[in-house]
Amino acid sequence: MLIALLPGDGIGPEVIVEARRVLDAVCGDALAYEEAPVGAAGYRAEGHPLPPATLALAKRADAVLFGAVGDPSCDGLERHLRPEQAILGLRKELALFANLRPAKLFPELADASALRPEVAKAIDLMIVRETNGDVYFGEKGIRTTPAGRRQGYDIMSYDEDEVARIARVGFETAKARRGKLCSVDKANVLETSQLWRDVVIEIAADYPEIELSHMYVDNAAMQLVRDPGQFDVIVTGNLFGDILSDQASMCAGSIGMLPSATLDVNQKGLYEPIHGSAPDIAGQGKANPLATILSAAMMLRYSLGKDAAADRIEAAVAAALAAGHRTADLGGTTTTRDMADAVLAAL
Ligand code: NAI
Ligand code: MG
């Protein structure tokens, strides 16, 4: 099985190298790797944040392990040459429509959450966010009104097949977990959301064993902070999911802890920590590598059918935390390399 390693910028290469060491320890020669530049590194090497050879490798590989992109030195570039375009391009070109973001607090880190420990402890949820449609990909622009005023617009739309496809991922995810699915929309105001809700209810007929509920997105934002323990799986659109998944993940602790997967219809996926390139700490050995190591575990579970190997990595991360290792984002002084060494020792 071939893994495309796309380290990217800033702390991306620092955390990818540690995830690779953990994968080597668990999977040995069962996985092969090819590395390619992406983001600002892609722009410097090939003149584009997503060079054609990098995209071709990502398409050819069985899974993609992605670090992070973003570099302040690129701020002046035109939008299509900025590093962040690489991740949007990969999602679109590989038809990666289902972004899965688990938010679960390691009990050892109850004090690290922005929420009170007793509230944070109850978080164990998965956000299933659509990433190929919605207002991000609709017609957009800045035009001039008849009155000569500038007007910005972005069209929000979903067709029923797009909704059905992500709804099924939501139901299947709930089936594999605690059997509860909450669909988040704004059906009281938006027609796109009304169709979303209608289609989710139609698909629910195929999943009588799943307990389905609906929630408006503004209320969902509040409930995530008030009582996150009430959620098992949340399914929602691109825009609402973007916002809610950042919120949920921070409720569960440090940004340096949280992994993600983005899948196509065949479970091929791109795996990445939710954090960015962290230019403020790049090159200092301070980055927490656990989000990327946990993303590698998700890759083994979702795309490569290696559940036992994924379980071993997750248990080793818990053991490293239980042994007291803490990187700076968790209030400690453990370096990137030492944190990975602690995971390797636990393995
Ligand atoms: P960021 O996630 O890079 O950093 C936010 C804060 O969290 C910083 O203080 C950073 O030091 C800290 N942090 C992040 N990851 C950490 C880790 N593993 N260990 C310890 N501390 C960590 O977000 P920011 O600063 O808004 O963006 C920096 C760049 O990253 C920008 O160019 C942005 O566009 C890009 N970005 C890229 C993403 C991606 O590649 N998927 C996602 C988010 C942002
Ligand atoms: Mg976001």
Image (cartoon, rainbow, N blue to C red):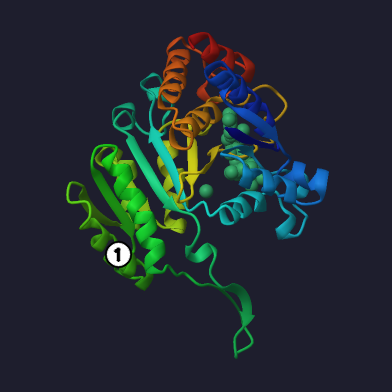
| Extreme residue toward the left, this view | 208
Q: What is the x, y in percent for residue 240?
A: 42, 56
Q: Quadrant of the N terminus?
A: top right
Q: Nearer the viewer, residue 258 or 295?
A: 295
Indicate the amino acid at tag 1.
Answer: Val
* Quadrant in which ligand 1 is drawn: top right
Residue at 70% in and 34% down: 35
Residue at 53% in and 8% down: 345
Residue 318 appearing in the image = yes
**114 up-or-down from 19: above or below:** below
Q: What is the x, y in percent for residue 51?
A: 74, 49
Residue occupied by mark 1? 199
Q: Residues within 10 Å of mark 1 (few under 14, many from 20)?
A: some
Q: What is the x, y in percent for residue 308?
A: 41, 22
Residue 11 appearing in the image = no
**246 up-or-down from 286: above or below:** below
Q: Report which quarter residue 113 is drawn in.
A: top left
Residue at 28% in and 60% down: 200
Is the CB of mark 1 within 8 Å of ligand 2? no
- Indicate left or right for 328 with 225 as reference: right
